[in-house]
Amino acid sequence: MKRNTLFFILFIWTYSHAIYAIPTETKIPAQAAVASAHPLATQAGKQILLQGGNAFDAAIAVTAALAVVEPYSSGLGGGGFWLLHEQKKNKTIIIDGRETAPALAHRDLYLDQNGAYIAKSSVDGALAAGIPGTVAAMVHLSEKYGILSLKTVLQPAIKLAEQGFPVTQHYQKMAQFRLSVLQSFPASAEIFLHNNKVPKAEHLIIQKKLAQTLRLISEKGHAGFYEGQIAENLVSAIQAEKGIWQLDDLKHYRVKEREPVQFQYHDMQVFSAPPPSSGGIALATILQILQTYDFELLDETTQSHLMIEAMRRAYRDRAEYLGDSDFVKVPVTRLTHPWYAEGLAAGIHLEKALPSDNLHEIIPAVGKSVSTRTEGQDTTHFSILDTQGNMVSSTMSINYPFGSGLTAAGTGVLLNDEMDDFSALPGTANIYGLVGAEANAVAAGKRPLSSMSPTIVKTPQGIALLGTPGGSRIITMVLLGILEFEKNSDPSQWVKRARFHHQYLPDKVFFEKKAFSKDMITRLKKMGHQLQETDSDYGNMQAISWDYKQGVSAASDPRVEGQAIVFDIP
């Protein structure tokens, strides 16, 4: 390991005096780029840029369009994080549009009278839904950062909702996965199914009510969704299904602007999501552990072993310390400190895995179940770069495919099941196999812990924008993407790289088929790692690279159906 005291002293001074900005001098890109999880959303972003909008206007258009064409991944009934870089002000900020727990929520909301978790109570139906933040984020983007009217930038999404979009194979797979839940809610079945079955390919999904809701938002902004008729319809639908929303929950919802987590890895400045996301802190932990070694000089198997051990420790800390920093004290400075990472690295053996049980136990081990969701192509991400140098990296979700399954009649709004991201019972795994402690317990007005990790990385040679869906695996996918970027590879390499993942509990390394060679698998097992090949590929990364010399390039994950485009602005 390297021990350079002077380096760390200089780093701490720099860190403590850093402004959350990306020093790009006076450089501006020659072309614009949009990468999103659906071609129709990508085209919506391009349309707005060609109409004279900036990256923030295009972000609203893409957010709204994805809400229409990816109902299984995001929507007006969900939330997310929008990482922005405003080039003119050299300012980098994150908009936290994460859902909040309703005022009547409490720590034992999902427990029975014996203190046991009530199966699926935080996943299906009205009680699973948090107060949505996506609409508030779009309005905030428009009012503070955009240059076109909200009515203009929402027009592509309104048109898509009114005229419909064709069902794809990916849509069919998602609908089949959640078929029984969609069938149990008539308003959802009417919109997202056909004759109460998964629609055939090319069948048009038309959403007239959603178009009306979008139009009302375009005219009245925040009040068009969080007050008035839409709000009343949302609350009525929730309460009719024994949910606990009240009108004041919606009326009082606000997004928050937060400073991103910022840290240094080699010559990279990394900016990612702060609490209530765990993404930025976990990335800082993992990458700074790797930085204590001559990582690039290690053989490939040892590199993978080291990454797994770093993941294990970062996710252990996630489970113990992380939650909504407005409610609990999250030791961000300590957890992102390079000396803390060095301390964690001291416990890593380069030839032997340390079982998760041997790490300091957080809580009674009652949640060591394997995740029931492995593909991780629900949730969504997009990246945008305009020709002024403005950037947006955004990850959004309604959590499980098609969220709670409940659509509020009269609104077209499909509601999230993000309440499952809380620790319903500390020590019990959520739908993605993640365990948590009291820091992430349910509380009124609190935002559930997330793994969403929209990220911007800056080097002396250029900038990367990247992010992905994938539940608990988002962080490790972004990690692998950053390491690919460090190799000066094209974004197409970042998005198609074979993936592996460890999240502390369950104590297993999940990996895609091509992630490890047979020899590596043998060696990793001898080191003590428990390996499990995933039954399918996972993730859906959307990435943009701005190389100061080579120009702009972009790529969409080949595992799904997105589109990445680079184009001129006349």
Image (spheres, rainbow, N blue to C red):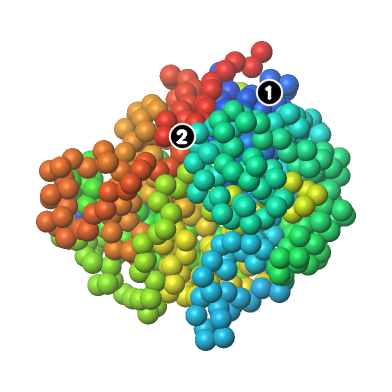
Which quadrant, please, contains the C terminus?
A: top right
Q: Is residue 234 above or below residue 559?
A: below
Q: Nearer the viewer, residue 84 or 412?
A: 412
Q: Is residue 450 above or below residue 357?
A: above
Q: Position of residue 413 (x, y in %)?
A: 72, 49
Q: Please say whether residue 477 is visible from this viewpoint.
A: yes
- Residue at the limit of the structure toward the top, as seen here: 570
Q: Residues within 10 Å of mark 2 (few under 14, many from 20)?
A: some
Query: Would you say the residues marked 1 and 2 are in contact, meaning their CB atoms lie under 8 Å apart?
Result: no
Q: CA distance from mark 1 to mark 2?
A: 23 Å
Tell me the mark number nearer the camera, choosing from 1 and 2.
2
Q: Residue at x 47, y 61 (%)?
A: 431
- Badge 2 marks a residue whose secondary structure is loop
Q: Nearer the viewer, residue 519 or 402?
A: 402
Q: Which residue is mark 2?
A: 560
Q: Amino acid at mark 1?
A: Gln
Q: Please say whether residue 66 is visible from this viewpoint.
A: no
Q: Position of residue 334 (x, y in %)?
A: 43, 65
Which quadrant, please, contains the N terminus?
A: bottom left
Q: Position of residue 461 (x, y in %)?
A: 41, 29
Q: Residue at x 65, y 67 (%)?
A: 127
- In the displayed structure image, the side of residue 504 where residue 189 appears, left or right: right
Q: Residue at x 75, y 67 (%)?
A: 239
Mark 1 vs 2, N-terminal side: 1
Q: How many marks?
A: 2
Q: Residue at x 52, y 86 (%)?
A: 114
- In the displayed structure image, the side of residue 207 where residue 34 appears, left or right: left
Which image quadrant is residue 352 in? bottom left
- Residue at the limit of the structure toward the front, as seen here: 195
Q: Residues within 10 Å of mark 1 (few under 14, many from 20)?
A: some
Q: Which mark is residue 47?
A: 1
Q: Position of residue 146 (x, y in %)?
A: 73, 35
